[in-house]
Image (tube, rainbow, N blue to C red):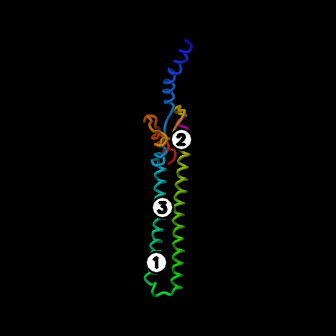
Amino acid sequence: MTAGVLGASPVAAAPAATVNALKQVALVDLQRCLLETTQGTKGKKDLESAFAKGQSQLDKKTEDLKKKYEDLMAKRAMLSDEEIAKRQQELVVKDQELQQLYAQLQEDVATKEAQLTEKIYKNVAALVKDIAAEEGLQIVLVRSPATVLYANPKLDITNRVIVAYDKKHK
């Protein structure tokens, strides 16, 4: 009789514990917070603008380099070997500078993006902590296809976080 009571007890208690635990769980989609908050949207536009400006400068320098190369090819027959070698070396140096500028542009944009992401993430984490305390949530998970395969939409507090974020961080 004792074995029957012990055997039935955990099985009967498990579904109730699971249902209660789910009421204390929520999800936040960080990617949406990054893209849909006012700060995130503005930051993305600023990044795109900075990249476009840098890319425009790179395109101009690339076009200048191309023209110098074409000029060298057109005048090659009229130039001395020494002058050809000198101009080729100048083209190599300009090409290296162009590659360095391109790498610098990518690095600058990546750094700015990482700083923006970190700032928004920290602000979201603080807001989620406050919301969790208000709602009596025990755990808030990051919602992404890699971490959460399915969740009841009622558990998702992303919209609330975005609205609270925009109110607090204008």
Is the residue marked by circle 1 packed among few (<14), some (14-19), or many (20+) residues within 10 Å? some
At horizontal 46% and vertical 37% (from top left) the residue drawn is 156
Q: Residue at x 45, y 67 (%)?
A: 56
Q: Nearer the viewer, mark 1 or mark 3?
A: 1
Q: Is residue 94 above or below residue 44?
A: below
Q: In the rendered view of the protein, which quadrant contains the N terminus?
A: top right
Task: Find residue 51 and name its label.
Answer: 3
Residue at figure coordinates x 52%, y 61% from the top left: 106
Going from N to C along the chain, the mark reached first, 2 or 3, is: 3
Q: Which residues are magenta?
A: 125-132
Instruction: Please tell me whether mark 2 sits on a helix, a strand or a loop.
Output: helix
User: Which dot marks residue 127?
Assistant: 2
Query: Which sits in the foreground, 126 or 69?
Result: 69
Which of 149 and 166 lies nearest the eye of the viewer?
A: 149
Is residue 64 depicted above or below 163 in this figure?
A: below
Return the residue at label 1. 69
In this view, the mark in front (2 or 3): 3
Disc 3 crowd rating (10 Å Cα; few below 14, some 14-19, many 20+) is some
Q: Is residue 81 above or below residue 3?
A: below
Residue 133 is drawn in which quadrant? top right
Q: Position of residue 120 (x, y in %)?
A: 53, 48
Q: Are marks 1 and 3 in contact (CB under 8 Å)?
A: no
**Amino acid type, mark 1:** Tyr
Gap between marks 2 and 3 measured at Cα: 31 Å
Are circles 2 and 3 on residues that touch, CB within 8 Å? no
How far apart, in angstroms, are the residues tagged by discs 2 and 1?
56 Å
* Magenta part, dominant SS: helix
